[in-house]
Structures are given as C-alpha cells and as structure tokens.
Amino acid sequence: MAKAFRFGVVSAGGPSSSAWIALAKRIEELGYATLLVPDRTVTPLATLTALAVAATATTTLRLGSFVFAHGFRHPALLAREAATLDLLSNGRLEFGLGAEVAASDFQQLGLPFESPGARARDQS
C-alpha cells in the first residue's frame, strides 16, 4: 500500500508572537502536514515553547523538532516535555532525536562537544 507524500516546513521562528502564530496558521492553511523547529541555541525561539504555541494556534498541523538535540537535556526530562506536548496537542507531536552537529551550541551551553559516535552513545 502506497503512502501519500506529506510536506512540512522548517522554521526557526518569527520576530514576534503574532508573527509566529500567523506563520503556523498559514502553514496549516496551505496544507502542509508538519511544522518543524530546529533545536539550536542560535535560533530565536526555544523549540518546545515555540511548538506549544503553534499547537494552540492550529488544529491539524503536526509539530516537531528538526531534531531534538539529546545532549542539551537529560533524556527523562526531554521525554516528559515531549509527552506533555504530544498530550496537549492531541497527539500531533512528531518526535525526532539527533546527536547534534554544531559545536557552537554546546559551547554556548558550556557542554563538551564530543565525537559523533560518543554523542550518539551518550544517554545522560
């Protein structure tokens, strides 16, 4: 059985609350399936908060990160935040987890930036 293509938008945010809400609504109106927000320290909006606001402004748009950087948060806390967002958005969260790519994000947070293999293995 073939699955239909779905298209999404990756956005790092908007200059204001009203602009972010308008963008989320417009993405949904245009028929996109998903809004993804990068989990980076160099973007203007915090990922989980931005997704929660987008969830309140839309009804069908699926929401996710491009991708959650597991090295930024303890896995149990990230799982709790993700489960809460999924519950409060009526199951619209698309959870993606990655091992990060930018040393600058880690430097801003005062965290060590290890090799890709070590980042992928690290679960704490």
Image (tube, rainbow, N blue to C red):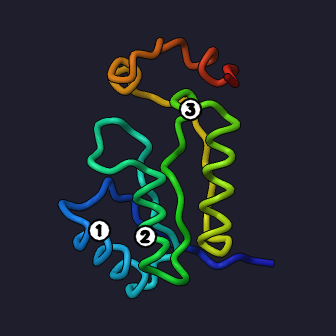
- The local secondary structure at tag 1 comes to helix
The answer to which of 100 and 41 lies nearer the viewer is 41
Q: Are marks 3 and 2 in contact (CB under 8 Å)?
A: no
Q: Position of residue 25 (x, y in %)?
A: 37, 81
Q: Is residue 85 left or right of residue 50?
A: right
Amino acid type indicated by mark 3: Arg
Q: Quadrant of residue 122?
A: top right
Report how far apart the C-alphas of labels 2 and 1 lie in the structure: 8 Å
Is 43 above or below relative to 33?
above
Which sits earlier in the primary sequence, circle 3 or circle 1?
1
The residue shown at (56%, 32%) is 73
Mark 1 crowdedness (10 Å alpha carbons): few <14, some 14-19, many ≥20:
many
Which sits earlier in the primary sequence, circle 2 or circle 1?
1
Q: Is residue 99 left or right of residue 122?
A: left
The residue that disc 3 covers is 73
- The local secondary structure at tag 3 comes to loop
Report how far apart the C-alphas of labels 3 and 2 lie in the structure: 22 Å
Numbered circles on residues, count: 3
Which sits earlier in the primary sequence, circle 3 or circle 2?
2
The residue shown at (55%, 82%) is 60
* Image quadrant containing the N terminus: bottom right
The answer to which of 107 and 4 lies nearer the viewer is 107
Report how far apart the C-alphas of labels 3 and 1 lie in the structure: 25 Å
Q: Are marks 2 and 1 in contact (CB under 8 Å)?
A: yes
Numbered circle sitting on residue 54? 2
The residue that disc 1 covers is 20
